[in-house]
Amino acid sequence: MTDYLRADLSDSRFEEVDFSRSRFHNVYFRDTVIRGAWLQRVEIDGYIDSVTVNGVDVGPLIELELDRRDPDRALLRPTDADGFRRAWDVVVRRWDAAVERARSLPEDLLHERVDGEWSFIETLRHLLLATDAWLLRAVLGDPVPYHPLGLAHSEMPAGIPGVPHDTEARPSLDEILAARADRLATMARVLEELTDEQLDEMTQPVLEPGYPESESFPVRRCLNTVINEEWLHREFAERDLAHLEGQSG
């Protein structure tokens, strides 16, 4: 398999090109046209907006079907403070169930990657970093809030002050959950005190270097980021738990 890593192939033309058995990870198809394609046994997982297939915008259809399969999803699009609190209750409830499911497996399997994706414990480590970044730093103004067990997304360049990049760490499930419990409690406290007016405010820029950048962000965006990260990565984790359960059984 030929690897194209961090390559810029924008404004390219592909004609009579065979992509069979290829893998695309963290790729961008903005303003892209695909014509005369054969899509068979194709799996696509990602953000879908204004995607037209054979003249049909499939984005709304996909959202409707996903909401039908899991009615909790509709609560993950909050518009006011009460909605954010309800969304967070759903996130916590679903993660509690996922953790209990994970506890039924040998802990070694919780460090195992399925199809190249993060392990269960790596997923929890990444969520630790996401909360540190978008809640503790962006919303609460802590310039360097990062727990050492946090795990940045793979595309983040190394060397950002304070941001942990220890890909070799192997904390136990209980160890990472203990670190995570403090962040979950902080999020619950922020949401408990949240008002509709605060949602529409902008954060104060954190001047010290770190992640996210030293900018002002809508409070709504920051809290949505934490909630969406929690929801999506829990879905990925449960997908992989199903594989690990089959392997364990």
Image (cartoon, grey):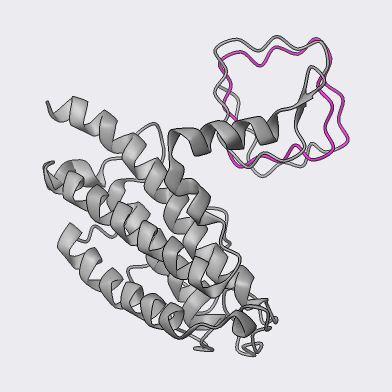
Q: Quarter of the image for the C terminus: give it.
A: top left
User: Where in the figure is residue 20, as x and y percent of width and height?
Assistant: 61, 13
Relative to the observer, which residue lies in front, 150 or 245? 245
- Dividing the picture into quadrants, the one containing residue 224 is bottom right
Q: Is residue 80 above or below residue 25?
A: below
Residue at image x 81%, y 10%?
36
User: Where in the figure is residue 5, as x and y percent of width and height?
Assistant: 63, 40
- Dividing the picture into quadrants, the one containing residue 193 is bottom left
Is 210 on the left or on the right of 34, as rendered?
left
- Dividing the picture into quadrants, the one containing residue 25 is top right
Q: Quarter of the image for the N terminus: give it.
A: top right
23 in magenta? yes
Relative to the observer, which residue lies in front, 203 or 59? 59
Is 35 on the left or on the right of 126, as rendered?
right
Q: Is residue 167 visible?
A: no
Q: Is residue 111 above or below residue 60?
A: below
User: Where in the figure is residue 206, as x and y percent of width and height?
Assistant: 62, 88
User: Where in the figure is residue 22, as x and y percent of width and height?
Assistant: 58, 21
Q: Is residue 196 visible?
A: yes
What's the magenta bit mostly, secondary-structure-wise?
loop
Which residues fall within the magenta stretch?
Answer: 11-34
Is 216 on the left or on the right of 223, as rendered?
right
Residue at image x 19%, y 31%?
245
Q: Is residue 136 above or below residue 27?
A: below
222 in magenta? no
